[in-house]
Image (cartoon, helix red, strand yellow):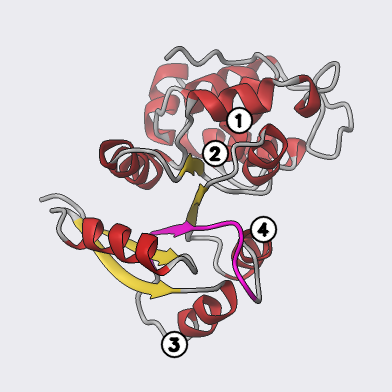
Amino acid sequence: MQNIINVALVDDQVLFREGIASLIKNEAGFSLTMEADNGLDFLSRLKTMNDLPDILLMDMEMPGMDGMQLNDELRKKFPSIKVIVLSVHAGERLMARMIHAGASGYLLKNCNKDELLNAIQSVFNNGFYITPAVLKAIQSPAANTKGVTNIQSIPIEISRRENEVLQLICMELSNAEIAEKLFISVRTVDGHRNNLLAKTGCHNTAGLVLFAVKHRIFEVIF
């Protein structure tokens, strides 16, 4: 039985929001659990919900609380909600900044229906979704520094085993699958994953994948 993906939507552009809401409502395997026109309203209503959304589709520019502020609040208070940015802004600095801040994906508003649904499913199943534009953004000179550094640009060292675990995470393997492949326990994999998060300063799997791509530890081919 397919899991139902619970999706929330925050965007102050009424026609765009209504269009995305209609798309989600009419697609099998997806459920629209909430709509809001700004971050403050979304957070307020979120506190009264029994079942949190799995995925949040959010705009960047909104009154009261913008997407960057909302993303920061969610990472602190509701870290289980995975964020996909839907924006008209294609700037590499903004894309890289949002991914490093914990967003699981970044799409432009001119993307098509299939790409949007694919992104939601990928983030739900794997924790991240990478587009060629995001890949270019995090590998651009503005987003990179020499050597391997964490998100504060402090040099770090990744051990051989951590490197192996990181590459398998990027290949979308589960902890159990990584453990089987490397002949180690799931608990040991958990330990390596937690060490990687601590060393890199990343917030989640999406951050680790983008870290690996940025530092050429893993290569994504489209």
Q: Amino acid at mark 3?
A: Thr
Checking the image for residue 210, the label placed there is: 1
Q: Residue at x 40, y 43 (%)?
A: 123
> Which residue carries the number 3 mark?
48
Which secondary structure lies at badge 3?
loop
First in sequence: mark 3 vs mark 4: 3
Q: Which sits in the foreground, 201 or 59? A: 59
Q: CA distance from mark 4 to mark 1?
A: 18 Å
Q: Quadrant of residue 214?
A: top right
Q: CA distance from mark 3 to mark 1?
A: 33 Å
Position of 49 with respect to 207 (left or right) is: left
- Circle 1: is it few (<14), some (14-19), or many (20+) Cα within 10 Å? many
Q: CA distance from mark 3 to mark 2?
A: 28 Å
Residue 172 rendering spot, x and y as whole percentages: 41, 28
First in sequence: mark 4 vs mark 1: 4
**Picture layout, residue 209 above or below residue 79:** above
Residue 5 within the segment the image draws in magenta: no
> Which residue carries the number 2 mark?
206
